Structure formats: structure tokens, C-alpha cells
């Protein structure tokens, strides 16, 4: 996609009717569709909740959704101040590396900043190099918190 074609991309709020396209785009990256997960996002996340700042953006070209980004303001335990969290971003594979995800991220960060949020976080699987590279190219790096986890064995019979 050329720079002039990128100019034809509009960024708008995601709508519940976008669910099918979000599932399709996500499945192309994930390798399988998880419509139940996205139905829960639609039902809970896209609901108007004035108590929480949520960012649900879509990138559209010729009235077709070609990318999405979801985030929200969260504050967690351990003394973490409220911050923006990006928890989903996706672009049609043939349109990746054209600047669409960058436009979505820029718009999301502007909304967080307008709400007084000055830090944005995300979590990326260490083997997802394209997404990890995307966020690093936009200034994301290791934060002050370290994720720790343990795999629990199945319950013994």
C-alpha cells in the first residue's frame, strides 16, 4: 500500500457489528478463530461504561474494516498507577507494514493522553516477533514490573 493509499484509511470507533471482521483478522494472525472470546469483548468491552476509559478503534478502507486496536485504562495491585493497556491489535495480513497499526496506536495513545494517562503498557508473547518488533519500534520497552507465572499441574485424581 502506498502512502497515498494509506491516506484513504480512516480510524473510527469499533462498532458491535465489526465483530465478524475482528474475528477474521484475529484468526489470520492466531491461526484459529476464537469467536467466543470476541463475543465477550463485544458484550463487555464495547459497552458504554462511563466509569472506565476504553479505546476500541477500527481502521477502515472503502467501508471495510482492515484493522483494529483495543485498550483500556487499568490500575493493578502492587502500587501501579492507572495506565493505558493495549490488549489487542490486528491488521489484515496483506496490509501489514503499511502504517495502519501505527495510526491505530497513535490514535489510542492520544485518547489516553487526553484523559491524563501518561503511561501505556502491553504484553506480548516473547515468540511473537512481528508484534514485539512493532511495539519496540514505537518506543515500548521493558517496564518497571516483571511478569511472573507458574504452570499449575492438573488436579491429581
Image (cartoon, grey):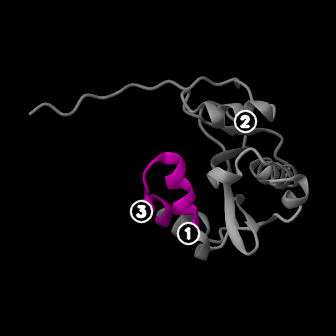
Residue at image mark 1: 19
Q: CA distance from mark 2 to mark 3?
A: 27 Å
Residue 127 within the segment the image draws in magenta: no
Residue located 42% across and 52% down the image? 32
Task: Examine the rendering and report whether any part of residue 71 can be seen.
Answer: no
In the rendered image, the residue lying farthest to the left is 157
Q: Earlier in the sequence, mark 3 or mark 1?
A: 1
Which span of residues is magenta-colored?
19-39
Query: Distance from label 1 to label 2 (Cα)?
Result: 24 Å
Q: Which residue is mark 2?
A: 135
| Depth check, front residue: 60 or 52 | 60
Q: Mark 3 highlights which residue?
A: 36
Q: Earlier in the sequence, mark 2 or mark 3?
A: 3
Circle 3 — which element? helix
Q: How far apart are the alpha carbons under marks 3 and 1? A: 11 Å
Residue 36 is at least partly visible in this image: yes
At 74% from the left and 49% from the top, the residue drawn is: 101
Please rate how many residues cluster around mark 1, counting C-alpha atoms within 10 Å: few if below 14, some from 14 to 19, many from 20. Answer: some
In the picture, the quarter occupied by the N terminus is bottom right
Which one is nearer the viewer's eye here, 29 or 111? 29
Q: Are marks 1 and 2 in contact (CB under 8 Å)?
A: no
Q: Position of residue 116 (x, y in %)?
A: 86, 49
Amino acid at each position: 500500500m502506498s502512502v497515498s493509499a494509506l491516506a484513504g484509511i480512516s480510524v473510527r470507533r469499533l462498532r458491535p457489528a465489526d465483530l465478524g471482521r475482528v474475528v477474521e483478522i484475529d484468526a489470520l494472525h492466531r491461526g484459529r478463530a476464537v469467536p467466543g472470546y470476541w463475543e465477550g469483548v463485544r458484550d463487555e468491552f464495547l459497552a458504554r461504561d462511563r466509569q472506565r476509559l476504553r479505546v476500541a478503534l477500527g481502521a477502515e478502507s472503502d467501508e471495510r474494516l482492515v484493522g483494529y486496536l483495543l485498550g483500556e485504562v487499568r490500575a493493578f495491585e502492587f502500587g501501579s498507577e492507572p495506565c493505558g493497556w493495549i490488549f489487542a491489535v490486528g491488521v489484515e495480513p496483506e496490509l501489514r507494514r503499511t502504517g495502519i497499526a501505527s495510526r491505530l496506536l497513535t490514535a489510542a495513545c492520544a485518547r489516553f493522553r487526553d484523559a491524563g494517562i501518561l503511561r501505556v503498557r502491553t504484553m506480548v508473547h516473547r515468540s511473537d516477533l512481528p508484534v514485539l518488533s512493532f511495539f519496540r519500534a514505537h518506543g515500548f520497552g521493558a517496564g518497571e514490573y516483571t511478569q511472573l507465572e507458574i504452570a499449575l499441574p492438573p488436579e491429581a485424581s
